[in-house]
């Protein structure tokens, strides 16, 4: 019989990649979706009929209990969250409810219904924030710099705590930024690759940006979901950093994307203070040697391959939209 999995946040970037990955592995895939007045299923459009969707919300404990009781999965991946850092300043309480307490709601449902279910928590390099050392590994102290980062620290520690308190198979994947053609439009990578495509095709001329000096360790979402799965296939639950270990600035990202589209970024990019943050995470760079050693995981896609893939996908999509 195939293994059953429940993915919260299945309509998001990572949920869509993991659903495909697990279908290919022969899993029966169930996804949790929240109600909205217009369906938001574009990222999993191609999976229609191959995965089963269930309505529930991270705010609603009973809905999570019900979905886990009905599906009875062997593995749960908790990807659902308010995941955009700037929104966490404008909606800090909602971010705390979704991104922090939401984790406890899923863990509580598992504890009550079947504590043998294996649980993955989508933790974030934003927890390192004002970094204490470089590169960051599983022992590096946290110093989050946004309500999002603070909420993720809670999610990480409650996962560790349920493992220690109840002996649950609960893992926290501390993932550094990972992108793809399915990345949300407001995140810097996708904002830039979409703009490069639109400028190339004559639909826009300028791109307003925030801090070009920020440095991130960017990888490909398709590579990273495999690491999440590997964590739940081990003999023991544990926490792992998932990263490439390579740093690039936002300026490098802009330059790579525009160059691939055949454009000179200096002619189009403007700085707008509206995109600066109340507190910035200046630099992040992960040390994934534990994942490499114990999971046998390593990233396959380079920064340039990732940015080219995203620009090409956005060029194709914008061309299709123009042709309509
Ligand atoms: P994403 O594209 O923003 O997806 C977030 C998902 O959460 C969406 O499916 C969203 O549903 C769902 N969601 C939000 N609030 C919910 C609620 N109250 N109840 C149920 N579902 C809710 O995020 P992602 O990039 O795939 O990231 C996946 C996870 O990894 C997130 O927890 C994120 O914080 C974490 N993470 C991401 C990165 C990265 O670089 N991508 C790095 C580290 C950690 P709707 O479609 O209805 O909005
Ligand atoms: P984050 O690392 O989770 O906050 O991911 P983002 O993709 O939202 O931002 C990565 C970095 O890009 C941050 O340091 C931002 O300050 C910086 N950045 C610079 N300009 C922009 C912009 O216009 N939009 C976004 N989202 N980030 C920007």
Image (cartoon, rainbow, N blue to C red):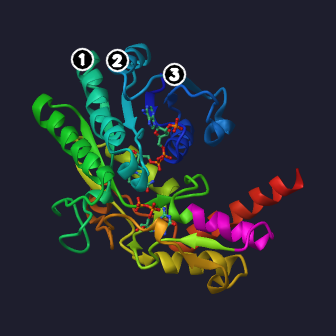
Badge 2 element? helix
Say which residue label 2 marks. 65
Say which residue label 1 marks. 112
Residue drawn at (23%, 49%), measured in percent from left and top?
A: 153
CB-based contact (under 8 Å), mark 2 and mark 1: yes
Check the image and report above or below for 85 versus 112: below
Residue 8 lies, in percent from the top left, at 44, 33
Q: Which comes sooner in the sequence, label 1 or label 3?
A: 3
In this view, the residue in front, 229 or 7, is 7
Q: Residue furthest right?
A: 323
In this view, the residue in front, 24 or 302, is 302
Asked if residue 143 can be seen in this view, the reply is: yes
Callout 1 environment at 10 Å: few (<14), some (14 to 19), or many (20+)?
A: few
Badge 3 element? strand
Badge 1 element? helix
Highlighted range, magenta: 190-205
């Amino acid at each position: 019989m195939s293994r059953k999995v429940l993915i919260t946040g299945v309509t998001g970037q990572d949920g869509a990649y993991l659903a495909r990955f697990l279908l290919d592995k022969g899993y029966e895939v169930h996804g949790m979706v929240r109600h909205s007045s217009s369906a938001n299923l574009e990222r999993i459009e191609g999976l229609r009929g191959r995965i089963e969707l269930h309505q529930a919300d991270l705010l609603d404990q009973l809905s999570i209990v019900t979905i886990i009781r009905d599906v009875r999965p062997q593995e749960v991946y908790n990807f659902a969250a308010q995941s955009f850092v700037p929104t966490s300043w404008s909606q800090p309480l909602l971010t705390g409810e979704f991104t922090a307490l939401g984790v406890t709601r899923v863990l509580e449902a598992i504890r009550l219904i079947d504590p043998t279910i294996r649980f993955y928590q989508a933790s974030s390099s934003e927890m390192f924030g004002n970094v204490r050392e470089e590169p960051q590994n599983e022992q590096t102290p946290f110093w989050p710099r946004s309500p999002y980062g603070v909420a993720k620290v809670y999610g990480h520690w409650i996962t560790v705590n349920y493992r220690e308190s109840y002996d649950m198979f609960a893992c926290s994947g501390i993932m550094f930024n990972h992108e793809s053609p399915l990345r949300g439009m407001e995140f810097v990578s996708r904002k830039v690759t979409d703009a490069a495509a639109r400028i190339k095709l004559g639909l826009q001329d300028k791109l307003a940006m925030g801090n070009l000096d920020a440095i991130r360790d960017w990888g490909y979402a398709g590579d990273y979901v495999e690491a999440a799965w590997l964590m739940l296939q081990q003999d023991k639950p544990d926490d792992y950093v998932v990263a490439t270990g390579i740093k690039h600035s936002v300026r490098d990202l802009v330059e790579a994307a525009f160059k691939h589209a055949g454009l000179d970024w200096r002619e189009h990019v403007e700085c707008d203070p509206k995109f600066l943050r109340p507190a910035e995470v200046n630099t992040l760079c992960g040390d994934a040697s534990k994942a490499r050693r114990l999971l046998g995981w390593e990233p396959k896609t380079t920064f340039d391959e990732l940015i080219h893939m995203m620009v090409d996908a956005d060029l194709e999509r914008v061309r299709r939209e123009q042709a309509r």
